Image (spheres, coloured by chain):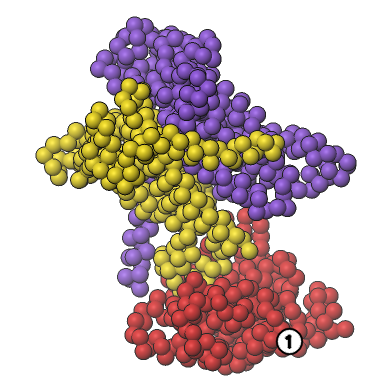
Chain colours: A purple, B yellow, C red
Amino acid sequence: MIKRKIEELFFKVLMILATIIVTGSFFLIVGTIFSKGVPYMNLDMITKIPGGGFYIGKEGGVLNAIIGSLYIAGGATILGLIISIPVAIYINMYIDGKKFKSNLIRLAFDVLFGIPSIVYGAFGFLIMVYFGIRASLLGGIIAVTLLVIPILVRTLDEVIRTVPGELRDAALSLGATRWEAAKVILRQIRPGIFTAILLSFGRGIGDVASVLFTAGFSDNIPTSLHEPAATLPLAIFFQLGSPVEEVQGRAYASALILTIVVLIITVLAELLIKKFSKHKI
Amino acid sequence: MLVFTLASVSLVFVIGIGLYYRSIPILNKLSWFDLLTKSAWKPMKGLFGFYPFIMGTLWVTAIAIIIALPLSIFTSLYLVEYAHAKIKRVLIPFVNLLSGIPPVIYGVWGVLFIVPLIQEHIAPHFIEFSTGYSVLAGGIVLAVMIFPLIVSIITEVLTTIPQDLKDASLSIGATKWETIKKVIIRKATPGIIAATVLAISRAFGETIAVLMVCGNNAVVPHSVFDTGYPLPALIANNYGEMMSIPLYDSALMFAALLLFIIILLFNIISRVILARLERNLTT
Amino acid sequence: MTNTPHISVQDFNVYIENQHILKNININIPNKSVTSIIGPSGCGKTTLLKSFNRLLDNTANVKIDGKVLVDGENIYDPNVEVTHIRKKMGLLSQRPYPLPMSIYDNVAYGPRIHGIRNKSELDELVELQLKATGLWNEVKDRLNASATRLSIGQQQRLCLARGLAVEPEIILGDESTSALDPVSTHIIEDLFINLKQKYTIVLVTHILRQARRVSDYIIFVYMGKIIEFGPTEEVLLNPKEELTREYVKGFIS
């Protein structure tokens, strides 16, 4: 008995340690980013574009990257929604009953979700070459749209599935067409759509590999879709490698900004998801 | 609607075909076998051996899984089987927050924390000198990145195991740990495998975070403190300059194709396992 | 009641999620006989049964006070070893839950956990318990097959054999026949009647006919309280309490 108790205790301690490491790594990361980033944080950082070139210039901030990121993540999310909402409705309303077919489509989106962003980046680049688009805001939006479609579809699909079937049937039995019933459901899942937007925006704003060769990079704020655009992750990535201390500082400050933005988005999305699936952990 | 659905579903095929199409020039010049097994990487001379990059990817992924899998399994077991509801409510959101952190932030953390840690505190115990930029650094950063993925799948699988089955073992006088070891783990094995496969495919494709801490030398690593050059990092690092060198562009597309095929297969395998598991446990 | 109680519940209260599930329970369960707990669903029957081997411990937000004495030992004493308590009792749940392993390993599971490693000793034990539950002839050629391949009725008997293999003193049954066909139900009921020579058996059931067929005593529980306790025939045919009479009315007429 003693031996059994010791064994149980041993593994329980091991489990607690593992849990501390896994959850603690979050604090370690955020702590590192904050301690490095806060000293370099100032108003210029979020109100000015880099002075004298992003790689060597010591002046200015990363406004170009902030705006670029907002454009790309925002544009991709809007474009993605336009495509994803009909897809999610289609999976749930037009082919239910045919489980195999809808499950196959779901599998396809699960797989798309698993494809790494570098592949989307490379593929986005192929599309750009094909249509003769140079590295630009538009190119970045296209690549990130590809990246966020699976996220949007999966989230929307999950949310629509929580709508009780009776509601849909009720709408249909009142003589509504499927499309009208779909509108009823869309109204029902409005918070769910918001969750999907947050998740998609969060992923879009943080990704590097997809925009690396599709968006280009620029010290200026883009004024048209065909101009190259900087993004926060790229600004971090490029400026971190600079030998100039102030430029590295800009990378740390950018990392801090990105982390804060993404954390806020994730927390909001978490809260919304919790509202939707109280039965799940 | 149908059009959008078909279009986005067929994206799987379009990506595959597009990448393959662009890989044809290099495939005409060199065989699959040569591309995958040759070590010389000299684009200027037309030598494209992917072996070092494949090995770099495998090293980093293996290290990440070796670190992440046991920690994630133990964490999930603790969260589901031992932790009080209150602790669970506090801890699970942090696991989710971890999954929201962008790769580039993991990369910065790797450069600022893990790389110096290896250089100053870990490597000196084993070898004379390391810059810290190594497959080990890549593996550790990746491990942290895949924690949330593995933990979320395994906790879900564990919660679907019926309490009555656990009671059956407990009522015989087994301790909780014995029940976990002999019954729960066995029941959860397919889920653990699926989570692992999914995590491997995620680790394969991770680009930026790994690129920032691995050192990126086109040499096959022989120890955890060696530098490595995983496939995604190869694509990311060289895309800009490829145009001027013949076949380089095609070679990088081939690298993307390779990643795509492996990840596609792994994803399908794990999703099928998970779907089957869900069906078995709910009926 | 001629013999000394095997399980003695004293001033026992259970709260789950702040709801008072069991209210001031006092009962003595007689030794080596079958006692059935009856009552409408949601009245606390199963909670009472599970409190006998401390399976309630795993429920979230549970608060327990009072005593349950088994062989004179309070199983809710903080110093008591839970696994030791549970070893004394075999549990047969509503549906059979064979462990994810072979037929042989299912029965050998308990003995192995409690330290028996000797192969021939285990063989003997497995054979003994499979014979005791009438399974031996049906499965002796496929002991290494997965337990989930058995029919539901066979699985439930296997679960009983698994429980018996740790040599308990008490068998707890939680509507153990509710998932079974009539033939399997009959086999299990007969097993209970035979087993009471060696074991104290406590069953939760909502089938009054079953309660009458197998049990010596009946406890009627209503809204978390024990309303009536006595020999089977008395409670079913000549109840003292109005509530009991209402509940068994359908049975008598």
The quarter holding residue A89 reads top right
Q: Quadrant of residue C96?
A: bottom right
Of the pair B85 and B69, the residue shown nearer to us: B69
Image quadrant for the N terminus of chain C?
A: bottom right
Q: Nearer the viewer, residue B25 or B20?
A: B25
Residue A103 x/y as whole percent: 62, 50
* Viewer-side residue, B75 vs A251: A251
Q: Is residue B242 above or below residue B121?
A: above
Image point (48%, 57%), residue name:
B191
Q: Chain of mark 1?
A: C
Q: Is residue B118 visible?
A: no
Callout 1 crowding tier (Cα within 10 Å): few <14, some 14–19, many ≥20:
some
Residue shown at 88% from the left, 42% from the top: A174
Give residue A264's position: percent from left, percent from top. 51, 29
Please state if A238 lies on the left or on the right of C81 as rendered.
left
Q: Judge from the rendering whether residue C237 lies leftward or rightward of residue B220; answer left or right.
A: right
**Tag 1 secondary structure:** helix
Where's the C terminus of chain C, which quadrant? bottom right
Q: Is residue B206 left or right of residue B63?
A: right
The part of the image, by quadrant, that contains residue A14 is bottom left
Q: Is residue C135 visible?
A: yes
Residue B245, horizontal then vertical, whole percent: 31, 25
Residue drawn 69% across the image and 76% down it: C178
**Measuring 65% from the left and 39% from the top, which residue is drawn there?**
B5
Say if C84 sits above or below A194 in the image. below
Circle 1 residue: C212
Q: Residue furthest front?
A: B28
> Whole-percent x and y of residue B139?
31, 42
